[in-house]
Image (cartoon, grey):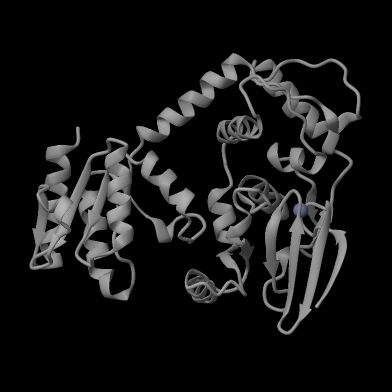
Amino acid sequence: MNSESESCPVCKSYATVTVSHDPVKIFVQCPVCGRFEYYPMTVDIEEFNLNHLASYFVYNGFKDNILKKTEYKYFTTMSKEMCDEYRAEYNKGNTVNGHPVHLSADNVENWYPKRLSDKIDLILTYLHSRSNYIGETIKLEKETVIGCLFLIRYKQDRYGHNQSYTDELEKQASYMYEYLTESKLIKPENSWTGGFWGRPIQLTPEAYSRIDKIEKDKTHGKDVLVAMQFGDKTKRLREAIRQGITDAEYNPVFIDEVEHNDFITPELLKYIRDSKFVVVDLSHQNNGAYFEEGYAMGLGKPVIQLCKKEVRLHFDIAQKNTIIWEDEEEVPFRLRNRIIATIE
Ligand SMILES: [Zn+2]
């Protein structure tokens, strides 16, 4: 293995790029994009829309952070199956391969905001997350600004290769700053030191009220987290639960299917917080499901419990009203009715 410092293939920041030859893979530690790995032999980073990927990393990347340092999470283009395998080892205490999170062009495109208003929402939430206190004036590094403001720095040539497109970057950034200023979301700034990219940014009260609204909308959404045992054995049950929730006109969220395809605890907690209610199946005596149910109850979220007949429930929750099912077939109808009866 040899390690060298060079430019990040996505954002061009000064980064640590490690090349290993067996198998050929490239590991990047970038201050802007965080940790990620790719295999040039099978998936070239160029297969991604690099503009979108750069923004994706700014918003979702695994950067070093005192609190998260021990997680060893990184994005990788290796197969989802390999990720699952390494993660299972990781959870058993073998940290050699770290904690990989599957990265695919589909994940990136599904996440990438299509509407301007969605981009603005993300920008405001990001700026807020970078501030230590309400009203703080912050400065972002140039490469972070580019990803954060969804600027276009690559254009594809006629061979489909990403070519740098840097001459318009300042214009694009100026326009976004003007847009945010004229929409009264950031404070106007006429002059500052430190060059174009060192513009100080301060959110306005309007921005904070929009951020509040974004947070509230999330909780009034239609998402419903489902806690259960995942795997081949529970496929029928999973589809039955999906059907029941969909029939009640809610949107089931199975944590292993969303965004990172990874069981990330902070992420999971966020989904529970954003869910209107939570559906928990306790048939498999799964500790995770008990924990998720407890967390949801602590937040005052309604919980709808399911359990297969003849499974003994943990004492604390045994008295709760539970849908006891014998066959998966009956789950969709009963779950739908229970949701309609208990959730306003
Ligand atoms: Zn980078």
Residue at the bottom extreme of this rendering? 22
| Relative to 298, residue 209 above or below | above
Q: Position of residue 333 (x, y in %)?
A: 12, 54
Kindly tell me whether residue 157 is visible in this rendering: no
At x 46%, y 24%, the residue is: 213
Q: Is residue 115 left or right of residue 10?
A: left
Residue 66 in picture, x, y percent from top left:
65, 48
User: Looking at the picture, how far across and down is residue 202, in whole percent?
Assistant: 70, 21
Q: Is residue 168 left or right of residue 70?
A: right
Q: Quadrant of the C terminus?
A: top left
Between residue 128 and residue 180, name the one nearer to us: 128
* Image height of 274 relative to 85, above or below: above
Dividing the picture into quarters, in which one does residue 311 lie? Answer: bottom left
Name the quadrant of the N terminus. Answer: bottom right
Query: From what the image shows, is residue 223 above or below residue 172?
Result: below
- Using the image, determine if residue 320 lies above or below residue 184: below
The residue positioned 73% from the left and 23% from the top of the image is 137
Residue 234 shows in the view: yes
Rendering quarter of residue 230: bottom left
Position in image of residue 147 (x %, y %): 72, 43
- Which of the two residues, 301 or 165, is positioned nearer the viewer here? 301
Q: Residue at x 17, y 56 (%)?
A: 306
> What residue is at 66 percent from the left and 48 percent from the top?
65
Looking at the picture, tell me which residue is in the foreground, 310 or 79: 310
